[in-house]
Image (tube, grey):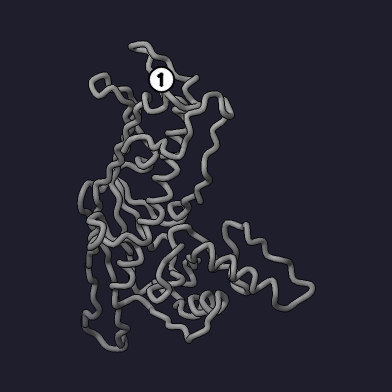
Amino acid sequence: MAINVSALTEYVNQNNGELLTKAVLGANTLNYIDIMPSVKYKDVLNYLDSTVVFGDASVCGWDPQGTDTFTQRTIEVAPIKINKEFCDKDLRKYWMNYQMLFEAGRETLPFEEKFIETNLAAINAELEKQIWQSDKARSGLFNGLIPTIVAENAVIKKELSAGYNAIAVIDAAYEGMTPTMLIQEPTIFVSHSTFRAYVQGLNATCCANREVIDAAAEKIAYPGDSRVSIVPVTGMEGVNESIAVAIASPAKNLVYGTDVEGAENTFKFWYDDKEDKFLFKVLFNAGTQVKFPDQIV
């Protein structure tokens, strides 16, 4: 995809030296969930579950009981690439041409750092969304956490009655948690929109002496249970509410698989003499899985 200058007029020295970039809502899911590196294609998560039976020791004899069961869950990653090209000649007639050098071997792309910065931000924002919402059947890449979770029969699913609000959503997620989940300090993941509505709702109810909650917080504790965190994530934004409004789980129960951790932020940028263009490349693996479906609401 080449540079798009269709919205520009052929002016010179217009706001010379300044290029404003659009803000991108940051990705933060990977700050919480488990990252599994060195996944080239498919890998397995191996589990051992043991049960014991208390026997009567008042008599002699050996009576073995109980089981030790090995199980596996497979995580599959998709190879993802971002390829872009930039033709500096496309900018010759526009205001940023003062940064260009028309001399073989001295080619320059105006605002090269800005191009790289905005593209990496866009990659992270898109990856954040795909980690939660990617549907392999449609994208051909990998299943995100939500399609994986929805397909699992063992997941604890809570349905809300009509007219529910953000407080009802988060309360339902909390009420669905098992004691095993609670001792692992679980997280309730919601969209920024749901989080903002939840904070507004709490601040509007009860009591004059209660501290006002800041909607800008990266996370807050569930009122009355400091073990449970409520975290807004960009990847939950825009999810069909008939599928999921909140996902509650021990954060490390959710897995992001990749080959090299942080590869989505590693780029190659160079000038290709044969193509006569600047080229930009990012390459990484990505996939998701859950460890224990029965520890998810």
In this picture, residue 147 sits left or right of residue 234? left
**SS for tag 1?**
loop
The image shows residue 9 at horizontal and vertical percentages of: 48, 33
Residue at screen point 32% across, 32% down: 85
- Give the residue at mark 1: 108
- Mark 1 is surrounded, within 10 Å at the Cα level, by few (under 14), some (14 to 19) or many (20 or more) other residues, namely some
Residue at screen point 35% across, 56% down: 130
Q: Is residue 173 above or below residue 5?
A: below
Residue pushed farthest right?
208
Q: Quadrant where the N terminus lies?
A: top left
Which image quarter: residue 29? Answer: bottom left
The image shows residue 168 at horizontal and vertical percentages of: 54, 79
Q: Is residue 137 above or below residue 169?
A: above
Residue at screen point 35% across, 40% down: 263
Q: Which of these two is toward me, 281 or 274?
A: 274
The image shows residue 20 at horizontal and vertical percentages of: 55, 37
Residue at screen point 24% across, 85% down: 60
Question: Can residue 13 be seen?
Answer: yes
Question: Can residue 17 be seen?
Answer: no
Residue pushed farthest front?
10
Q: Residue flagged by tag 1: what amino acid is it?
A: Thr
Q: Which of these two is toward me, 234 or 278?
A: 278
The image shows residue 295 at horizontal and vertical percentages of: 39, 72
Q: Which of these two is toward me, 44 or 275?
A: 275
**Badge count:** 1
In this picture, residue 10 sits left or right of residue 211? left
Q: Is residue 233 above or below residue 204?
A: above
